[in-house]
Image: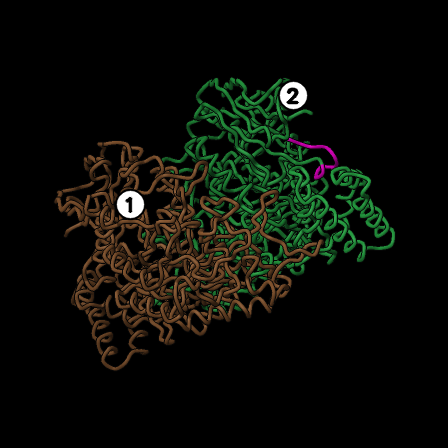
Chain colours: A green, B brown
Amino acid sequence: MGNLASQILRIPISRTWPLVDGGKFPAKAFENEVIEFGAVAFREGHDQIAVDLLLTNPNSITTRISLKEGSPGLDQWVAKVQLNQVGTWSYQVSAWDDRYHTWLHNTEVKLQAGVDEELMMLEGISLLEQLAEVSPAATKKKFIAISKVLADEALSATERLEKALAQDLTALAEANPIRFLENLSDPAQVYCERKLAGSGAWYEFFPRSEGAKKNKDGSWVSGTFKTAQKSLARVKEMGFDVLYMPPIHPIGHAHRKGPNNTLVAGANDPGSPWAIGNEAGGHDTIHPDLGTEKDFKDFINAAAKLDIEIAMDLALQAAPDHPWVKTNPEFFTTRADGSIAYAENPPKKYQDIYPINFDNDPEGIYQEVLRVVTKWISLGVKIFRVDNPHTKPVSFWQRLIAEINSKNPEVIFLAEAFTRPAMMHALGKAGFQQSYCYFAWRNSKTELVEYLNELANDSADFFRPSLWVNTPDILTQYLQFGGKPAFKIRATIAATAGSTWGMYAGFELYESVARAGAEENIDSEKYEYKSRDFQAAEKSGQSLAPYVALLNQIRRENPALGQLRNLTTHWSDDQEILVFSKTLAAEHNGGKENTILVVVNTDPHSVRETMVHLNLAALGVTGEFKALDLISGDKFEWGEHNFVRLDSFTQPAHILRVEK
Amino acid sequence: MGNLASQILRIPISRTWPLVDGGKFPAKAFENEVIEFGAVAFREGHDQIAVDLLLTNPNSITTRISLKEGSPGLDQWVAKVQLNQVGTWSYQVSAWDDRYHTWLHNTEVKLQAGVDEELMMLEGISLLEQLAEVSPAATKKKFIAISKVLADEALSATERLEKALAQDLTALAEANPIRFLENLSDPAQVYCERKLAGSGAWYEFFPRSEGAKKNKDGSWVSGTFKTAQKSLARVKEMGFDVLYMPPIHPIGHAHRKGPNNTLVAGANDPGSPWAIGNEAGGHDTIHPDLGTEKDFKDFINAAAKLDIEIAMDLALQAAPDHPWVKTNPEFFTTRADGSIAYAENPPKKYQDIYPINFDNDPEGIYQEVLRVVTKWISLGVKIFRVDNPHTKPVSFWQRLIAEINSKNPEVIFLAEAFTRPAMMHALGKAGFQQSYCYFAWRNSKTELVEYLNELANDSADFFRPSLWVNTPDILTQYLQFGGKPAFKIRATIAATAGSTWGMYAGFELYESVARAGAEENIDSEKYEYKSRDFQAAEKSGQSLAPYVALLNQIRRENPALGQLRNLTTHWSDDQEILVFSKTLAAEHNGGKENTILVVVNTDPHSVRETMVHLNLAALGVTGEFKALDLISGDKFEWGEHNFVRLDSFTQPAHILRVEK
């Protein structure tokens, strides 16, 4: 057996974290994220150990951080560290025989029992002499001076120990230790990416709808990058960091889908942007209706001036009239009858889409996709929202993302995969910086408590969730039937529980009518132009935009909300009142602790009164505290047990800042 | 990131099991143990995959075993395999693109919908031709014949498919697959040890008590290996496989403990066997009172004739008069005042024991312990019960066990460590074949359900628990205050839930009086001779021995009880009625399924009536079934929901065999 097993260390370190699949993948972090580093380390017998984190930053500078014992009985040693630099960090854990603290503990216990007093003094002197021997001159002098205190027979042993401790013996010994029997864990990596990889507020619109106009004959004039540029102010007013747009490429004609996903499109129907490619070009081309490459660059630049980044769609599939079908038929599957295979989920057929076959010519398709992505990066795109990555090989994504990030580490890929957990998690490990998740379908308090804890803990090392309240594909029953309160509740939870959240245009107008039998909007923008009067809605008080702007302002002003792993759920006596908090310690926030406590009624049809019971330690308080409601401006005196009344029809949530 | 991450496979395999610490240690198994092998494997899109286990036995012969999909939605693929050979096994998981089943599924769905009928026939023909091409002549002929069926335009597509399937197309394709895109997981190991490493019934006695006689003056004549040999019949009658004896070495005189752990021993007090060594010798020597090495060998041989193995104690510590103290003072710690350190847990002192310092002369002490262990192995000892391994370095044990097992793989080490989980688990990973566990302190139904599931599942790959009902150090409050029913209940649970269980002499006599304030027997055998009249107790009906014999007989006749990982707990409406089952499939038991269902009242003071609700699938039944009570001989007709009445004062448990 021995020859197959790893050698166990003298001071065993049986586990370290963060660690993904035993170290097969680096753990993920983003700039200024606070990560718990830890280890299970222990030793035989009663003597004490010390455990340190040796953390090496991307510049190869290593810092030693002392770990503190965590949960009693589990031999866990932990520290929370804020990673302040993008790049690859690495760490090892050091465990060693802490003879100073062993001696101190034994001496205190024995002096109290009146046992071995002189012997413990002798052993202390011997230890201090050892410490002195390896110390620089000034320190050596201090150790020797204190060892003379321990030898001073004019004093009792207890007096000698007290005197030595009063001369800061412990601090001196801790700062100048001999690390007896020191051993190190295997090294492991943490890959730290830029802030938007893990923390941000996203908005989605279709550029063709922004400024689109309907002619009298029922035909439409498409919006363009130029007209859409005017809508950037609206996105900025709501406080979003990223604007994501569905594909901006030419749209296929063959089998084009009509309104409401019907099989036949009329002459004026613009088609689904995801049916990419026609005679005008494919994935490397801009739809002529939207403008030119210059218009697109102008649009990106205009957004940048407002601190908004543009996220582009990467949907690796083709319309039947995509140029690849002629130039590279080997990118697709040829059926036994010589036809090119369209998309299917038998017996369903999607004849407007040709899926790519990644096994026919893996190198060819890889190089072509690399070329396309590189082109858009050269035009200024730094974020790609990848459509259905789970229908393409995970190994393809791993190679592509690694190669792109090796030259452009700032580029972020968001995975739009709604599928089983093994695939969703594998995409995160393959390198996707961010992932859509099941938040939209977690609406009850019980579901949310379980899911938010999973996202903040179990999967946070490899899966960064983006909490979208809706998308062109997702209008949940909760939103369909929950009325306006449902929209407010969902935005509140997404913006505060999620370090990244997202919203698709129309949400602020409470668009809630679904196509029959579907969980998506009727007259979906996927197949039609949409002209929405956001201003009129806001003027008449029929818009959620001001509330959304407030949520994003609260996020900006409270950096605890931008963290992924700092969530704690608390208890309430009501089955629909959700309570959670997020906190950022003073040392990780420029000296000022930031703690936000959210209490929200998840039932959109009710006024609910209940008691809320808080985990005070998670809030950094010990008893009563002052809380400021960042929505209403109300001030509360709260403690461990608190009464709340939440009216979904007016203010369904408190977003409380703990004031100290 | 790419350069740091493992490459993800074309058909990802994100996890395989059994796997200990990501493969750092081989998983444990014992001969004829049934182990679940599995993997999380999945692919992009809708096409089907097949997943196989490639299992290599200790003779380097590899078998391919098809894995079946486990829990829906989790992409888990599993098979239960019985390891029938001692040695190191290894495995890899293979995942591949299963084009035959993808085609079959799509064809069935499409024919039902009347879509693409001829195209699917063409694709089937093309696939069968590919399969034929790589097949041996006879198989090729069959594939070609069936492909002609699919081409037979005289029949409808549906008739052609039916005809092809009727000609066993699926079996043919499964037996002769092309494994498109096949890829393999990293290899991992399973170390399979002999049966007693994981499965057996143990008894403990002090040989000096067996045949000991008290003289009129109050002094004693020690029992010897010769007199103890007579007690082997008693051990055999109760059906035990292993007899463990406390240390058999000379006992120190200095600071010898008297009765009830008092500090001063009388002239006739024999001392604790764990205070090892005096002028007569140390760990390599037999206590002169017990006999000679020849007597010991005779004892081992006499036991072997009864199919009983002898387990010896390995307690690495010394009495102050142990020969090592003179010959090898470097094995111990010298204090600052020049004295040798005795054992302490400050301020408590154990002056009769010198602990070994494993860091002073690591190589010297290692070689000496190796010499001692090797000596006893040469005398026929194959099992060592290691006293307090958690007070010695884990790395020491890892080296020792590996070296011993490399020459003597049959040798078993049992860890007597009652401490925190990190250390207990590390000792298992270091190579200890077996471990004492917290069973003695898990007495309520809730505690037992949680703990038995942990032992059978979470830790079974590296920690093999031995369920002891008592030891010279453990007489729990449950036994102290539960009366005779408590003894019956605990023996029943240990013998049926534990693949290994153990019992220390006196348990069968219901010895339940504790030393005040301690969880151990008063007048402990650790410090005194004990003369017990087992026969008289049995004659007068005051002995549990016949019941213990029945339990061990039930174990021998029902191999499901000898398995570690096959436990399922079931529901009862009563908070003290524990229900669990263990099952061994027919294929793993010579063609005959063996399923045992245990229902036990854990409250020793009551008669309880309740309903028991069974997980029928875990019992291998679908509805009503016959059950034979192996204790009472009663026969029952049971189903999913059953009434039970359990009287702790008469028969606190049913041990039911499911009869089919």
Q: Secondary structure at mark 2?
A: strand
| Label drawn at residue A541 | none
Q: What amino acid is found at the position of numbered circle 1 in the picture? A: Leu
- Could you classify mark 1 by the number of other residues whose Cα lies within 10 Å: few (under 14), some (14-19), or many (20 or more)? some
Q: Is residue B122 left or right of residue A169?
A: left
User: Which chain's residue wears label 2?
Assistant: A
Q: Which span of residues is magenta-colored?
A: A587-595
- Is disc 1 placed on a helix, strand or loop? helix
Q: Position of residue A650 (x, y in %)?
A: 53, 18
Question: Label 2 neighbourhood size at 10 Å, few (<14), some (14-19), many (20+)?
Answer: some
Which residue in the protein does label 1 denote? Answer: B509
Badge 1 sits on which subunit? B
Asked whether, in this view, residue A311 is left or right of residue B544, the answer is: right
Q: Is residue A591 magenta?
A: yes
**Residue A129, image x, y percentages:** 79, 54
Query: Is B510 within the magenta?
Result: no
Classify A58 as above or below B649: below
